[in-house]
């Protein structure tokens, strides 16, 4: 990460934590969790610097573009601000700051279908949100995904954030089924790079 760019990972973690506190135990379905989390993450972007792409963000008052390549993308492009209104030139992309994918189906194949898109991207920060039943399964899934990233010969290094919802989920993975209440905070976070260890991040 270059010196003039802020570490995005703590911003993403904070957004997921706050969204989870707001929704956890409320009987909301998978889609409601996804919408709120992605909206909160997008809300962390410096709007004078980043153009944010992602579905459903207009409802969050962000007025952003729909999905582009990933579930959510932050990138730098020319922006002018006049009378408090921002005008972006998204076709003059200068830097891909964040690429994010979210996959709630609890299989390696489903996760890898989304994760390999991150692995071949040039994003400086790459975020994978997923769901598993146990903490051991979460770390195993992280290593499986990083093994896939290391196999990409044309890949570039990056800051990776894994955000794993850990719990006995069963049918909660299906749309319109209420998420079960867990006794402990359900998300666990790790950051890493291609040749680095998994470093746990406490949910602040």
Image: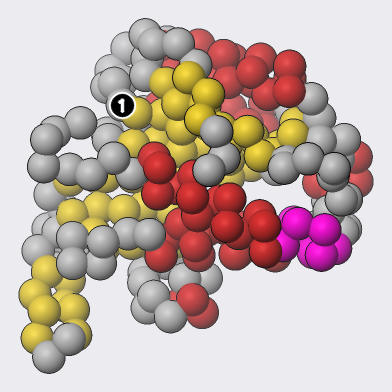
Q: Does the magenta stretch include residue 27?
A: yes
- The chief SS type of the magenta part is loop
What residue sits right under mark 1 in the picture?
Answer: 158
Residue 1: image quadrant is top left
Q: Circle 1: is it few (<14), some (14-19), or many (20+) Cα within 10 Å?
A: some
Residue 103 seen by the camera: yes
**67 or 125, which is in the foreground?**
125
Vertically, is 79 above or below 178? below
Evaluate whether residue 99 shows in this view. no
Estimate the x, y position of residue 96 in percent, counting from the top left.
24, 45
Start and end of the magenta stretch? Answer: 23-30
Q: Is residue 43 above or below residue 6?
A: below
* Mark 1, secondary structure of its residue: loop
Residue 138 point in image, percent of width and height? 68, 24
Residue shown at the point (59%, 15%) measured from the top left: 144
Q: Where is residue 118 in the image (x, y as percent from the top left)?
A: 42, 33
């Amino acid at each position: 990460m270059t010196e003039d760019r802020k570490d995005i990972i703590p911003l993403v973690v904070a957004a997921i934590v706050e969204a989870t506190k707001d929704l956890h135990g409320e009987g909301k379905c998978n889609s409601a969790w996804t919408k709120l989390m992605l909206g909160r993450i997008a809300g962390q972007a410096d709007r004078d610097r980043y153009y944010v792409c992602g579905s459903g963000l207009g409802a969050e008052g962000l007025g952003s573009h729909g999905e582009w390549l990933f579930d959510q993308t932050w990138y730098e492009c020319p922006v002018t601000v006049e009378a408090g209104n921002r005008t972006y030139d998204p076709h003059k992309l200068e830097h891909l700051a964040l690429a994010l994918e979210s996959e709630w189906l609890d299989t390696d194949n489903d996760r890898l279908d989304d994760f390999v898109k991150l692995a071949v991207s040039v994003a400086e920060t790459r975020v994978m949100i997923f769901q598993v039943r146990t903490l051991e399964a979460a770390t195993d899934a992280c290593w499986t995904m990083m093994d896939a990233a290391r196999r990409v010969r044309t890949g570039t290094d990056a800051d990776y954030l894994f955000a794993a919802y850990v719990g006995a989920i069963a049918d909660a993975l299906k749309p319109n089924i209420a998420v079960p209440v867990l006794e402990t905070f359900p998300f666990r976070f790790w950051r890493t790079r291609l040749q680095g260890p998994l470093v746990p991040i406490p949910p602040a």
